[in-house]
Amino acid sequence: MSNDANVKFRLSNSELWGGLIGLAFGGFVTWSGVRLKLGTINDPGSGYVLFYTGILICVFAATIIVSAVTEGGPTLASRWENTRWTRPLLIIGCLTLFSFALDTFGFLLSAIPLMVLLLRVIDPVRWSLTIPLSIAAPLGMWWVLKHLLGIQLPSGMFEIG
Amino acid sequence: METLLNVAHGFGVALLPINLLYCFVGVFIGTLVGVLPGIGPISAMSLLLPVTLSGTPESGIIMMAGIYYGSMYGGSTTSILVNIPGEAASVVTCIDGHEMAKQGRAGPALGIAAFGSFIAGTFALIALMLVAPKLASVAIAFGPAEYFSLMVLGLVVLTFLTQGSMAKALLMACIGIVLGLVGLDSITAQPRLTFGRIELIDGIGLVPVVMGLFGIAEVLLNTEQAIKRDVINTRITHLLPNKEDWKASVGPVSRGTVLGFFLGILPGGGAVISSFASYALEKRLSKTPERFGKGAIEGVAGPESANNAAAGGAFIPLMTLGIPPNVVMALLLGAFVIHGLQPGPLLITQNPGLFWGIVASMYIGNLMLLVLNLPMIGMWVQLLKLPYNVLFPLIILFTIIGVYCSSNNVFDVYVMIAFGVIGYFMRKLGYEPAPLVLAFVLGPMLENNLRKSLILSQGDLMTFVERPISAACLALAVVLLIGPLLPALRKKRELVALDEGA
């Protein structure tokens, strides 16, 4: 990471954003703790530990924000500098699509396209290996789980698998 | 005499064919993940956590333990031959191990790493056999205040040793506690942070959280970089160290073993810190410290022994107190819980077959590792050539199936994917997931013990400082929390800070 990437009090400061997310989360946890009832010190309620943990989260997040403002920190862009950032992004996209498809189409119909996509997205594997591997790996696992271990994977609306 | 009888009973359990098979599978997979850079023991154990469901508790835990200490052995292979640590505890082995390989002495480096690991592993097991029952009998007297303070100390030590900002590590630990509290309150049965989802009533599962944070996130991070491997191509010969090598290594192996074992017992400590500490100690004690970094065999023998001894020592707090000292042990705790078992002071007396069986299997596993690591070194080197563009999609597929099988619930797959993405962004922004996972496991226990202590003491906070063990733990935790504010201690922390996620 270059030194130019260290910036003071700019909105692109990644430390600032990390702290703000922490602060928001801490606020939510504290509020949840209050809502769940704190109880008393000799009979703590369900929200007791949540409330104080939420306050601690806010304190640590505030420390991070203060340090980001006073000492600066790397920009968001510099965190991905000189990396092949499109690959994780594509994998996240593939996994999101898979998570939507899994319940509807079942394991086999969603895992085979997922494997094809992953094998071609990361560092493209040749098609002659991609196709057999994408079919054999999910099919093999499905067979082992269903027939040897008696575990039923989701079969989806077409009831395949 | 009683110990010998127990050991014999343990061997009776460990030598059952099914347990031998699970032990072999564990050490084999452990060596495999140790050899392959990018996949550490945490990822592998989280991947295989659901598999433990299919057998007896002994078999599952024997396999999980095998993965852990197996990865300590395997990690040295890549450090020496490729200059890429297979897992975090082998980082320091790269320094002199790879130098030795470049000088044509890869064989003795691999040999001393394997023998040192074996000796240290054996010592750690004997010590575990002797110390654990004694500590367990003391721990029976522990009350909720002691447990609460011990858990606080464990979390603080881990955050102290985590790389980067301590505020970030503490923030992660607090988030872990909150996530651990999702679901029904164990005392009032009131649902907490469930957002009306029935799947969250039982809380968030450990398997999807760990698989997401360590499995998926690790793959996402690794795909960002083009992994280059410069494997030493020369034929590896003379795996047995010669007389001079042994003479130079006796001291480092002995010191590394003892140091590693004690650092392994400490909450928050473990294999990584012990390997660094051993290297620093050997360099300081050496009459020729200038040789370190240029292929000194002591720089391989000490750290490799230390990380294996620490792996054995880390079982003590888990088995005797039921408190995992690090993330790996938290996963093992998960394996116990999956089988309805609670490690702690009563485990040794109520379930001696399980405890002594695991200990005996670790000894057998150490022997298996010696056989796996030396004659089969050529096979492990070949594995280093496995293309990552094929391996990563397969890991993702395994994680999906693993998570689904652990609960037969598609919701857990969504949770894993979500934690995978969160884990990736966390790591990119410098937030380490290790404190989060340990706090996630300890969170419900911590809350339970805190509330019990307060109820029993009728709200008197002095209960935590009036009891000596509790007071000592809290005092140490306070020192570690304040410590980084002092420049000298901050520098020391930065030196020993570790990356548990690797």
Image (spheres, helix red, strand yellow):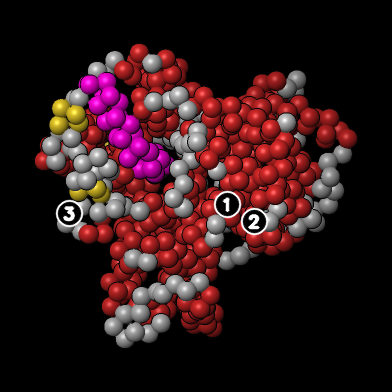
Residue B384 falls left or right of residue B226: right
Earlier-in-chain disc, 3 versus 2: 2
Do the residues at pointers 1 and 2 share their chain? yes
Instruction: Check if mark 3's residue and mark 2's residue have beta carbons within 8 Å.
Output: no
Taking B33 as reference, is A127 left or right?
left
| B146 falls in the magenta region | no
- Report the span colored magenta: B430-459
Chain containing the residue with disc 2 = B
Task: Tell me the amino acid under the disc marked 2.
Answer: Asn
Residue B77 visible in the shown view: no
> On the image, numbered disc 2 is attached to which residue?
B19
Circles 3 and 2 on the same subunit: yes
State the CA–CA distance, disc 1 to disc 2.
Answer: 7 Å
How crowded pointer 3 is (Cα within 10 Å; few <14, some 14-19, many 20+) is rated as few
When asked about the image quadrant of residue B409, the answer is: bottom left
Mark sitting earlier along the chain (3/1): 1
* The N terminus of chain B sits in image quarter: top right
Residue type beneath disc 1:
Glu
Q: Amino acid at mark 3?
A: Phe
The subunit letter for the residue under badge 1 reads B
Q: Can you give x and y, in whole percent of width and height, for residue B487 in the image?
A: 41, 18
Check if mark 1's residue and mark 2's residue have beta carbons within 8 Å.
yes
In the structure shown, which secondary structural element does the residue marked by tag 3 occupy?
Answer: loop
**Which type of secondary structure does the marked residue at label 2 adopt?**
helix
For the question of whether residue B329 can be seen, the reply is yes
Q: Quadrant of residue B199?
A: bottom left
| Foreground residue among B462 and A130 | B462
Q: At 32% across and 67% down in the image, what residue appears?
A: B410
Instruction: Between residue A144 and residue B91, name the one nearer to us.
Output: A144
Provide the residue designation for mark 1.
Answer: B58
